[in-house]
Amino acid sequence: MTLRVLIAVVALVAGSAIAQTPSGEIAGRMTDTQRTPLPGVRIRVTNGDQSNEAHTDHEGRFEFRSLTMGTYRVVAELGGFKAASGEITLSPPTPSAFLAWSLDVGCPAEIRVILGARSAARLVDAIVHIRVASAHGPVRISVRPDCEGQVFENYAVLVLGSAPGRVKASLGQRQMFMEPWNARLAPGQEYIALLWRDGFTTDDLLLPIVLGRVASPGVGELNGLRPSEALGILGKWSEGTQH
């Protein structure tokens, strides 16, 4: 009888110790260098065989709960920005961590927009109505010393208008660059274009205009609108205003 009681007591103490083991939490908010929230950032946390993944919400926030104590490697990735990484240690005295990281704009070859026009509107440098003036073919570009030269298609475009509520883009001719595997543009075609810094864009941020109307079924709210109407909505999206 005594042995059974002892075993029961030991089991109770062990179970109580396990139940009291604290769980950890890693949360945070991702922004660009202008402190604008970045939605869609892929966050990965790893600790040995443990691996967890999440994406930031429209406010740039993420959260991992019920983590065991230990040191975690955290990696943040978003197309068009340089990846950020670091380590954070969770322990019983400090079981929670909050990461307030700002991501730098990446090299042009890293630009890969998967957010869609609504989310990208707050991140891009310009939202404009353009007409393709001429196609100049491939050009090798390096915009920073740490970026190797990459080949892009170079276009001269005529800016016909820009979204309100942002820094107004100058009307007239400017350059635009696209990765070679994106859509090939022909002179005379018109688009609503969401441009990253220095005029880089991708085909998913070009909304074709046909017979004076946006013809992009992938962006239902804008499809069928006049360019000025679409620019107005995109301007509201760029400020985080719901339409």
Image: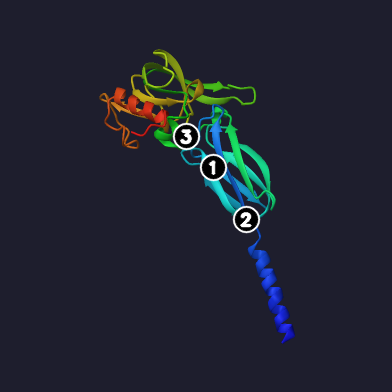
Whether residue 68 appears in this view of the structure is yes
At mark 2, the secondary structure is: loop
| Distance CA(mark 2)–CA(mark 1) | 23 Å
Q: In the figure, 7 relative to 195: above or below?
A: below
Residue under circle 3? 113
Q: Amino acid at mark 1?
A: Arg
Q: Determine whether label 1 and label 3 are within 8 Å by CB.
A: no
Q: Mark 2 or mark 1, which has the lower sequence index?
A: 2
Closest to the observer: 9 or 217?
Answer: 9
Question: Where does the N terminus fall, quadrant-wise?
Answer: bottom right
Residue 121 lies, in percent from the top left, at: 42, 30
Residue under circle 1? 42
At mark 3, the secondary structure is: loop
Q: In the figure, 142 relative to 102: above or below?
A: above
Res 185 → quadrant: top left
Q: Residue at x 66, y 40 (%)?
A: 86
| Distance CA(mark 2)–CA(mark 3) | 35 Å
Q: Mark 2 or mark 3, which has the lower sequence index?
A: 2
Residue 92 lies, in percent from the top left, at: 69, 53
Residue 233 lies, in percent from the top left, at: 34, 28
Q: Amino acid at mark 3?
A: Val
Give the image's coloring scheme.
Answer: rainbow
Packing grade of label 3 (10 A; few <14, some 14-19, many >=20) is: some
Q: Determine whether label 2 and label 3 are within 8 Å by CB.
A: no
At mark 1, the secondary structure is: strand
Q: Residue at x 70, y 81 (%)?
A: 5
Closest to the observer: 187 or 79?
Answer: 79
Res 212 → quadrant: top left
Residue under circle 2? 23
Packing grade of label 2 (10 A; few <14, some 14-19, many >=20) is: some
